[in-house]
Amino acid sequence: MRNFEFYNPTRIVFGTETVAKLADLVPGNARVLILYGGASAKTNGTLDEVKAALGERVVLEFAGIEPNPSFETMMQAVELVRREKLDFLLAVGGGSVIDGTKFVAAAVEFEGDAWEIMQKRGRNVKRALPFGSVLTLPATGSEMNSGGVIMRKSTHEKFSFMSRFVFPQFSILDPTKTYTLPKTQIANGIADAFVHVIEQYLTFPVQALPQDRFAEGLLQSLIEIAPQAISMEQDYDTRANLMWVATLALNGLIGAGVPQDWASHMIGHEITALYGIDHARTLAIVLPSLLNVQREHKRAKLLQYAERVWHISEGTEEQRIDQAILRTREFFEGLGIQTRLSGYQLGEDAIDAILLQLEAHGMTTLGEQQNITLEVSRVILQGAL
Ligand code: NZQ
Ligand code: ZN
């Protein structure tokens, strides 16, 4: 196991009717900005519940954070916070709203052009406003981590940033808040969480036994609950498990002391930036092909994954690896997610465009061994046609 530091200060408040606890979680004298997305927080009643819990505090709202939150939109929130001298942010929504809020928290306190936060991947963040979240979409893990992803529409750049100053102070996870999600978003959430685990697990062995077993448990939990989750029944236990698995998948725990990949995410972000395809869907396009192309470097872990997660124990090593990759692809397809570029009407010319983006953004040595060069990314994308 590698050396590591593990730090996670986010308080999780989990369960039904927990939104009311905002009354205690937000400082009594706070001047609050509630940030949310399109219509969902309003139509499903969550926003009203949040406002009721905040009581007599000064509360302003910022609506309209889009999926894949944009720098352009979030800078409007930054201006509002500065103008109204607000001092506490509250995100109500999914990963996009929480990521956007993280950016606002850091940008309000940042001197200079706030896009530099993204260009430096958050290394230049020295402080941030305090904030919390009410999660309505289990997927990204943003509710309990210190990362965010922001897109600059004008330049088609989608960058992630990390800073210990943007851990949420608290996140409220009420599984009943997921009941209004459409099937496509439930499917996206399962796929995103699945790939988060894979990016931290399916690399090469470093004798990190608890991390491996924990990761395998999360993957198996997702496989177990997926059919019920996408059946759209309002089944509390299924939604509770999905919500907690998605949080645990990217809160630092399973990634501590192990090599990490993240190439599927980096390539996927470019696909979203260029073609607007949902984040999770880009991962489902890239991952199966990446596993195939990287099979030599990931051999030991692929065989472990095949055996422990999919119970594949027969056949030659190549056959078992082929089977594991096939089961992974079928898992995504079973969620209703297409796993090939052609399924999104993209072909060879898209590959050239994606590679140009990767080059422009310095994404030329990806993966746990930094051996995914542009040429290897091309082979991965060709395998995903
Ligand atoms: O805008 P509204 O009307 O709220 O609708 C949203 C949105 O259209 C809807 N939604 C959310 N909760 C709902 C609901 N609809 C009905 N009922 C509810 N309870 O869902 C749509 C998608 O929301 P979004 O927040 O975009 O989805 P997700 O949580 O998947 O977040 C995706 C973003 O997170 C980034 C992605 O790149 C992408 O920008 N990621 C962030 C990460 C992190 N911070 O650690 C890691 C991830 O790898 C990922 O990159
Ligand atoms: Zn993701």
Image (spheres, rainbow, N blue to C red):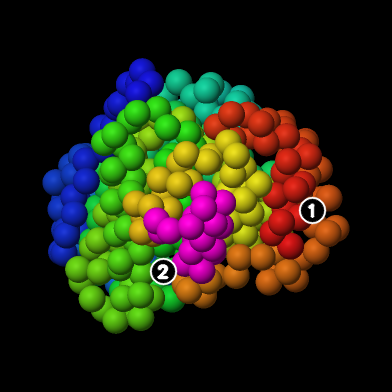
Q: As drawn, is 254 to the left or to the right of 282?
A: left
Q: Position of residue 101 (x, y in %)?
A: 44, 45
Contact flag, marks 2 and 1 (Cβ < 8 Å): no
Q: Secondary structure at mark 2?
A: helix
Query: What amino acid is found at the position of numbered circle 2 in the picture?
Result: Ile
Write down the residue under mark 2. 186
Q: Position of residue 171 (x, y in %)?
A: 27, 48
Magenta part of the chain: 312-332
Q: Residue at x 53, y 39 (%)?
A: 298
Q: Secondary structure at mark 1?
A: helix
Write down the residue under mark 1. 351
Q: Residue at x 43, y 76 (%)?
A: 182
Measure the C-alpha gap from mark 2 to mark 1. 28 Å
Query: What amino acid is found at the position of numbered circle 1 in the picture?
Result: Ile
Assign the N terminus to one quadrant of the image.
Answer: top left
Examine the rendered structure and indicate whether residue 113 appears above or below residue 330. above
Callout 2 environment at 10 Å: few (<14), some (14 to 19), or many (20+)?
many
Q: Residue at x 24, y 49 (%)?
A: 57
Q: Residue at x 66, y 65 (%)?
A: 340
Callout 1 environment at 10 Å: few (<14), some (14 to 19), or many (20+)?
many
Of residues 125 and 89, the one nearer the viewer is 125
Of residues 56 and 344, the one nearer the viewer is 344
Q: Is residue 362 magenta?
A: no
Residue 254 visible in the current orientation: yes
Pick whichever of labels 2 and 1 is earlier in the sequence: 2
Of residues 321 and 39, the one nearer the viewer is 321
- The label shown at residue 307 is none
Residue mark closest to the camera, 2 vs 1: 1
